[in-house]
C-alpha cells in the first residue's frame, strides 16, 4: 500500500453568510477560497450552512398545532437562498477549488423538491464534486426547516494525507456516528458547526483524542445585519449585534490546539498538520482497533439510501 503524504497546510475559515443572499455569499466564498490558496493551504473548511445561511434566531412562526402566513413567508425566503446539488453554485465552487488547487469542505443548505437539508460538500483540487454528507439529525428547532439525512451520505473521501470526513455540529454528540467515522479511518475530521459556546472547544479536543485524528472545526461569525432583513429574528433587531461569535479551532490527534479558538470576528485559521501524529497517537489508543473490545461491543451501520418513492420498471 502506498504511504500517504505526511504534512499539509490546513485552513479553517471563520466568516458569515452575506446578508444580501446567495449570490453575494458565492462571491465571498470564491474570494475566501482564493485567500486560503494564497496562504498555501491544501484543504479549506468553511462553516455549517454557509451558503444558504444558518437561520439562528428564526422560528418560522411555528406553534404546536398551528402555522402562520408570516412563518410560511419566512420559509419561502429561506428556501429561495438554498442551492441544488449539483447545480450552478456547485459548479462555481468546483471551479474555485480547482483554481486554488485545494480540497474544499463547505456547508450549504441543499434543496431537493420541497425539502431543505443541512449538507456538507466535498470538492477535490481538480474541482470535482467528490461527495456530500447530509446532516442525519437536525437539532431542536432545526427540524422545523431541515429534513433528515440517511446513511448513504456518510462516506469519507480520499486525499494524499488520508481520509477526509465531515460531521456537522451536534451530530458530533452522536457516539455511534463518531464510531462509524473512525471505522472509515478518517484522518482529517471536519466539523462545520453553529455552536459558538466555550464547551465546543472541549468537544473538538475530545473527538481528536478519541479518533486520533485532526479536527478542523469551522463556525460562522455572524451579525444581525447579515441575517435576512425580511425574516423574523427572535434574538435581535440591532444590525450590529453578534448572533454567532465563531470559536473555530484546529486540534491535533493528541488534543493539542494548533490554532484558535477565535471569537473576535472573521478570520482564516492556518496550521500545519503532520499526519504522522495519527500513528504516533495510536500506540496506546485505537477506538476501532486494539481498544474496541469487539468481543463485547458491535455497531452495525446501514449506509443504504432511503428514498420516499422507488420507481421500478420491467427494464
Image (spheres, helix red, strand yellow):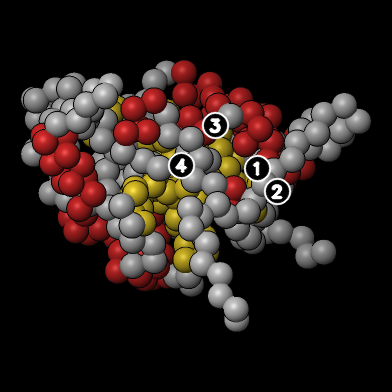
Q: Residue at x 56, y 70 (%)?
A: 312
Q: Earlier in the sequence, mark 3 or mark 1?
A: 3
**Residue 152 visible in the displayed image:** yes
Measure how far apart labels 2 and 4 are at the Cα level. Answer: 22 Å
Left-right relation of 112 to 207: left
| Badge 1: residue crowd in 10 Å (few <14, some 14–19, many ≥20) | many
| Badge 2: residue crowd in 10 Å (few <14, some 14–19, many ≥20) | some
For residue 172, the mark is 3
Per the image, label 2 sits on a secondary structure element best described as loop
Measure how far apart labels 3 and 1 are at the Cα level. Answer: 10 Å
Kindly identify which residue carries mark 4: 148
Measure how far apart labels 4 and 3 are at the Cα level. Answer: 15 Å
Mark 2 and 1 residues: CB-CB less than 8 Å, in contact?
A: yes
Q: Position of residue 120 (x, y in %)?
A: 44, 50
Measure how far apart labels 2 and 1 are at the Cα level. Answer: 5 Å
Measure how far apart labels 2 and 3 are at the Cα level. Answer: 16 Å
Per the image, label 3 sits on a secondary structure element best described as helix
Kindly identify which residue carries mark 1: 181
Q: Position of residue 187 (x, y in %)?
A: 65, 46
Mark 4 and 3 residues: CB-CB less than 8 Å, in contact?
A: no
| Badge 4: residue crowd in 10 Å (few <14, some 14–19, many ≥20) | some
Q: Position of residue 67 (x, y in %)?
A: 19, 30
Q: Nearer the viewer, mark 1 or mark 4?
A: 4
Amino acid at each position: 500500500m502506498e504511504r500517504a503524504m505526511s504534512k499539509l497546510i490546513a485552513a479553517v475559515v471563520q466568516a458569515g453568510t452575506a446578508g444580501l443572499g446567495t449570490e453575494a455569499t458565492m462571491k465571498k466564498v470564491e474570494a475566501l477560497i482564493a485567500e486560503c490558496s494564497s496562504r498555501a493551504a491544501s484543504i479549506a473548511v468553511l462553516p455549517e450552512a454557509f451558503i444558504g445561511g444558518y437561520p439562528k434566531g428564526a422560528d418560522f412562526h411555528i406553534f404546536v398545532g398551528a402555522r402562520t402566513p408570516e412563518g410560511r413567508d419566512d420559509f419561502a425566503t429561506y428556501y429561495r437562498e438554498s442551492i441544488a446539488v449539483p447545480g450552478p453554485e456547485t459548479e462555481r465552487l468546483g471551479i474555485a477549488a480547482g483554481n486554488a488547487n485545494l480540497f474544499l469542505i463547505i456547508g450549504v443548505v441543499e434543496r431537493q423538491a420541497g425539502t431543505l437539508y443541512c449538507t456538507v460538500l466535498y470538492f477535490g483540487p481538480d474541482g470535482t464534486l467528490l461527495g456530500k454528507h447530509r446532516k442525519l439529525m437536525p437539532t431542536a428547532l432545526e427540524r422545523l426547516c431541515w429534513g433528515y439525512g440517511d446513511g448513504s451520505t456518510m462516506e469519507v473521501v480520499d486525499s494524499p494525507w488520508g481520509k477526509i470526513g465531515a460531521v456537522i455540529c451536534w451530530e458530533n454528540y452522536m457516539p455511534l456516528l463518531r464510531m462509524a467515522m473512525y471505522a472509515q479511518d478518517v484522518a482529517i475530521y471536519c466539523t462545520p458547526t453553529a455552536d459558538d459556546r466555550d464547551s465546543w472547544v472541549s468537544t473538538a479536543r475530545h473527538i481528536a483524542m478519541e479518533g486520533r485524528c485532526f479536527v478542523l472545526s469551522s463556525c460562522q461569525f455572524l451579525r444581525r445585519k447579515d441575517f435576512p432583513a425580511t425574516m423574523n429574528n427572535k434574538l435581535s433587531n440591532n444590525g450590529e449585534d453578534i448572533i454567532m461569535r465563531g470559536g473555530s479551532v484546529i486540534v491535533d490527534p493528541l488534543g493539542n490546539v494548533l490554532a484558535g479558538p477565535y471569537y473576535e470576528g472573521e478570520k482564516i485559521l492556518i496550521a500545519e498538520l503532520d499526519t504522522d501524529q495519527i500513528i504516533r497517537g495510536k500506540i496506546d489508543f485505537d477506538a476501532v482497533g486494539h481498544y474496541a473490545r469487539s468481543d463485547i461491543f458491535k455497531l452495525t451501520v446501514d449506509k443504504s439510501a432511503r428514498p420516499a418513492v422507488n420507481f421500478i420498471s420491467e427494464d
